Amino acid sequence: TQLLEQSPQFLSIQEGENLTVYCNSSSVFSSLQWYRQEPGEGPVLLVTVVTGGEVKKLKRLTFQFGDARKDSSLHITAAQTGDTGLYLCAGRYNFNKFYFGSGTKLNVKP
Amino acid sequence: NAGVTQTPKFQVLKTGQSMTLQCAQDMNHNSMYWYRQDPGMGLRLIYYSASEGTTDKGEVPNGYNVSRLNKREFSLRLESAAPSQTSVYFCASSPLLGREQYFGPGTRLTVT
């Protein structure tokens, strides 16, 4: 059983479209991170959110942390082919428990 | 700065063989982690080290041991490899436990 559920699992869109991916749990996170991973490489951190209701923007990427700190979303505006990759959320519970979701595989077609 | 380095990049073992995966970081980070990544499962934490001299079990520690050799190096040992340990292994480090993690390029291990 995955502690963190990510949806959708796969997403294939055209360049220029908008998309949102989700990360949900029944548990409360003390913090949550989003990573992007390209084939054959390790994940690279995009953002960390800590406060319930927090919204962070990174160019065309908008990250939102739910008010109850149980869920998060990543919205990409006007997707580009360079956004292709596996998007992973990772939640921290208590002091020393870390769990990754299984990821959303995004393919942006030219 | 190389960041986080891992050796080897690829390894094939026979069932029952042993091996050690090496990891080193040059960012002066206190915490280090070992994960495995299987298709459809995301990353699962095997062991972590909050600081030099300490190690703790993660979500899937069975069949593995770790050593925090010094602040820079954190190794993962498979004493008797099993086909279920076929996976991609990632090492990561962070300034403090739970902070942003920096990952190595991974080791692809196949156990036949």
Image (cartoon, coloured by chain):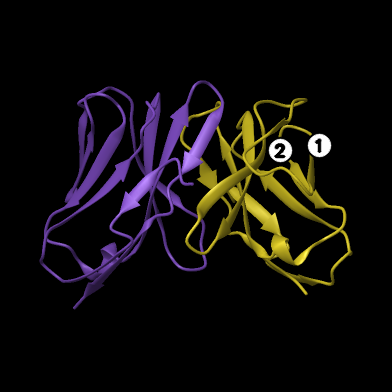
The image shows residue A73 at horizontal and vertical percentages of 24, 43
Of badges 2 and 1, the one in the foreground is 1
- The colour assigned to chain B within the rendered structure: yellow
State left or right for residue B73 relative to residue A81. Answer: right
Name the subunit of mark 1. B
The residue depicted at 12 percent of the width and 59 percent of the height is A18
| Quadrant of the drawing holding the C terminus of chain A | bottom left
Give the number of the disc on residue B72: 2
Q: Are marks 2 and 1 on the same chain?
A: yes
Mark 2–mark 1 CB contact (< 8 Å): yes
The image shows residue A91 at horizontal and vertical percentages of 42, 35
- The colour assigned to chain A within the rendered structure: purple
State left or right for residue A105 relative to residue A19. Answer: right
The amino acid beneath tag 1 is: Leu
Give the number of the disc on residue B99: none
The residue that label 1 is drawn on is B69
The 10 Å Cα crowd at callout 2, few under 14, some 14 to 19, many 20 or more, is some
The residue depicted at 54 percent of the width and 30 percent of the height is A97
Name the subunit of mark 2. B
